[in-house]
Image (tube, rainbow, N blue to C red):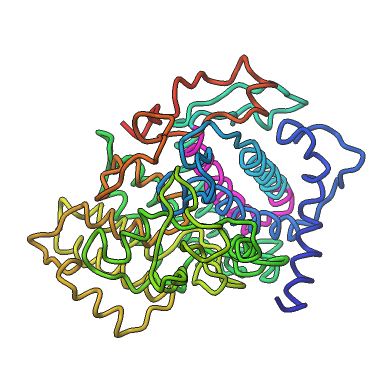
Amino acid sequence: MKRTHRKIYTVALAAGLLFSLAACEKGYLDANQTNPNQTENPPINGLLAGATYQSAINVFSAGNITSYYVQQLASPNTGSGSDVYDNVDRSATWRAIYLNVTDIRQMKKLALERNAYEHLAVADILEAFNMSMLTDLFGNAPYREAWSQGLNLKPGYDSARMIYDSCLSLIDQGVAAMNLPDPQVTLDASNDLIHGAKKEAWIKTAYALKARLLNRKSKLPDYDPAAVLSALGNAYASNADDAQVTRFESLSSWNGVAKNNASGSLDGWLSATFVDALDGTTFGVFDPRLPLITDTTRFGDYRGTVNGVGRTGSGTDNSACALSPNGAYSRGGAPLLMLTFAEMKFIEAEASFASDKARSYQAYLDGIAANMDKVGVATTDKQAYLSNPVVAVGVAAFTKDLIFKEKYVATFLQPETWTDARRFDYKYKDFILPRNAQLTTFIRRVGYPTSETSRNPENVPAVGSLADHLWWDR
């Protein structure tokens, strides 16, 4: 990493997160408590750096949970909790999201005081982004009382549907705020780690997030594909629009995982389900993205690890595939993706399928191409894949199953993949329960963290099973 990037991150992010770090011991519940070690006037652009950076890190943290549920990753250890649907404590992810929203709300407060409309817009968009991610993991959660006046150690829970509706409102408010004239303070490019202070880019991201959330309701009677397509019309037009972070304090997040594995700490192993889907075993076509994700084994082929079974070799003898330190998602400085043009094309394919199948089919092909361009697939390999009859089935033979199959690959390591798996009822070809799964069906939610069940038990909703469906997954 260049020294200038390290300096930008270290100075700005440290300033932006100072008050959050002081409150870490009790998490978001202390957001309104007077703290003598907490700065009363954090710099607004420091908060911008912290909020943009941490939002991407929260995607990584969530993805490092959900990628096991969708069998993109598998543990090298037999019966690992993430593999077999154990109720693993997710307190760290829960707290990180709430702390980040606390920072975001502090930025919003300062923005309102200073007529910093651009910061206000980013705050609204990022709050919607973080809270929608949290409710897609946990369901109902504290919201209206989470940042109420005074110290509240036992906040009530709001329904995930209410929070979802609030997120849509925040997105609309964010777009409106970004369009207000004459902000007294403007976004600073060096501290906006997602879009470098480009207003138009933030508006596109707001609509991309809106399209994602509107499409969340695909299984419900009030699903509105026309509204999804309308939002997409204002969202991304190319890979250049993607919301992502590329500057890091040290290693990029998935590069850290790959480096740790290479040094013997065993992490980032690929699931046999994912490898088989790409190496031709499941679908009969080799996907050229696979060599850009992982390396061949010592046997000269690609071999995944069965979820729940664990490693078959020593773990350090290169007998199974793992994230490559040089891979497109896990190389040094690889972008940490939040929302992408490829995802938008697959949303378009799904939303237009019933009304305009030809448009849906073209969007499906465009989504594949966009992701292949993103990860660096050679043009000849991309065209060979896109013209393969397994992929290029034609409009008449085109199915929604193909949309979900290709989106599963294009959203590799993204928590949104688990949302899709639940909306699709896990109907991927040859997708089966992990070995020794603790549920008799696929996992549908995350259990509430022990930080909540131990401190706020009277308000934490009962969870009958991790197979319980969330409100949009009916």
Where is 148 relative to 114, above or below? above
- Give the left or right position of residue 318, taking residue 332 as reference: left
Disc count in the image? 0
Residue 86 is at least partly visible in this image: yes
- Horizontally, residue 177 falls left or right of residue 437, namely right
Check the image and report above or below for 444 versus 300: above
For the point 28% across and 70% down, the residue is 286
Residue 147 is situated, as x and y percent measured from the top left of the image, at 68, 32
Residue 301 shown left or right of residue 200 in the figure: left
Residue 182 falls left or right of residue 431: right
- At a point 57% along the width and 24% down the height, the residue shown is 157
Residue nearest the viewer, comparing 438 with 215: 438
Q: Position of residue 21 (x, y in %)?
A: 80, 46
Give how far across and how far down residue 89 sits, in percent: 60, 34
Farthest-out residue, left: 396
Magenta span has 443?
A: no
Residue at (28, 56) in percent of width and height: 405
Q: Which segment did they paint magenta?
A: 110-138
Magenta residues, dominant SS class: helix
Residue 113 in the magenta stretch? The answer is: yes
Q: On screen, 299 above or below 129? A: below
Q: Residue at x 61, y 51 (%)?
A: 123
Task: Give the position of the C terminus as an image quadrant.
Answer: top left
Is residue 237 something one can see in this rendering?
A: no
Is 216 above or below relative to 375? above
Identity of the residue furthest to the bottom in this view: 380
Nearer to us in this view, 209 or 63: 63
Extreme right residue here?
36
Asked which quadrant contains residue 256, the reply is bottom right
- Residue at the farthest top position: 458
| Residue 293 position in % (x across, y down) | 45, 68
